[in-house]
Image (spheres, rainbow, N blue to C red):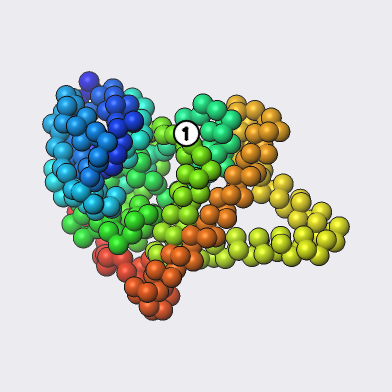
Amino acid sequence: MKPMRGRTSLIATMLNEAESIEAWMQGIEQQTVLPDEIVVVDGGSTDGTLAALNAWVAPVALRIISAPGASIARGRNIAISKAAGEIVVVTDAGTIAQPEWIEHLLAAFEDPRTDVAVGFFVPRTASRWDAALAATTLPDSAEFAGGRFLPSSRSLAFRRAWLELGLRYPEWLDYCEDVVFDLALRRAGANFRFVPEAVVEFRVRPTFAEFWKQYYRYARGDGKAGLFPLRHAVRYATYVGLVLVVLRGRRLELLVMGLAGLAYLRAPVRRLRRRQAGTDPRTIGLTALLRMWGDLAKMVGYPVGIAWRLRHFGLGGYAGGWKRISPTLEQSHPE
């Protein structure tokens, strides 16, 4: 293994990951650069995940913390509080890190101006379903420009110094906690560096029901956090307009709506081509269906999240957006 400068802690949370834990551990073992320690928080697994972790002969110091009932955010905060590294690398269970993942993330910190190294994640596609769902939901790294990418905590690293500002994952959120964490970092003035070469792989949801649940929860999290109201409003307006056009049945309006629908599918079809998944009409048709299915799940989930936010924080809390109930952070760079 290549030597590593400074101390680095890898943290992850687990819950009932028995089917994927072995692949996750192998991915860590095969890293060209290893962390100094690994801190894993188990949220109360009942399927053998904890036993697999305890039996793991990890390549570096391993600390396993059992925290039944802990949410993802709570689990990450616990892990961070126990980690000793100057750099904290974060990933999720269910992922498989490519061998140079940590090496690429840490290389970003050779520039002292880098506060957050933003890695990427790619789907493992073994079927038409996988290809269609991945094209629907997961942009390619080349599609992000100008710092627009809010990183998933599947693949992320940051300087521990930012924790001294009181920055933590928001434990009042069950989903979208990493988006609020990213926004809090940016609000505090952290300098993000996109590292598309730092890649972890994962599997997309295997069924319509699982995909619905995922996007329902994401949108509910947006509503709870007061995130992206304009984006969700546009989605509602688009589908209301679609229903009205269909009911009116005017040919010109139907033609315009059809062309708009094709434009809506342009990005996922391009992804299918770039990923060499082909342009079989069945794959494109499934992609269109999944895109609409995901939109419907979001439209159901978002108002549920808004209702939760209003119950807990009132109109003032909702009007304030995510900043209203996020930690107050100084607008300065940590030393």
Residue pushed farthest front?
46
As displayed, is residue 30 above or below residue 135?
Answer: above
On the rendered structure, is 298 left or right of 41? right
Q: Where is residue 137 in the image (x, y as percent from the top left)?
A: 53, 44
Residue in view at x 35 percent, y 75 percent: 313
Residue ID at (34%, 73%): 312
- The residue positioned farthest toward the right in the image shown: 251
The picture places residue 69, in percent across and down from the top left corner, at 23, 52
Q: Residue at x 38, y 39 (%)?
A: 119
Q: Which residue is drawn at 43% across and 54% down?
A: 217
What secondary structure is marked by label 1? strand
Identify residue type, mark 1. Answer: Pro
Residue 72 in sight: yes
Query: How crowded is the residue under tag 1: few (<14 C-alpha within 10 Å), some, or many (20+)?
Result: some
The residue carrying mark 1 is: 123
Image quarter hosting the N terminus: top left
The quarter holding residue 109 reads top left
Depth check: give the residue in front, 11 or 47: 47
Q: From the image, which quarter does the C terminus lie in?
A: bottom left
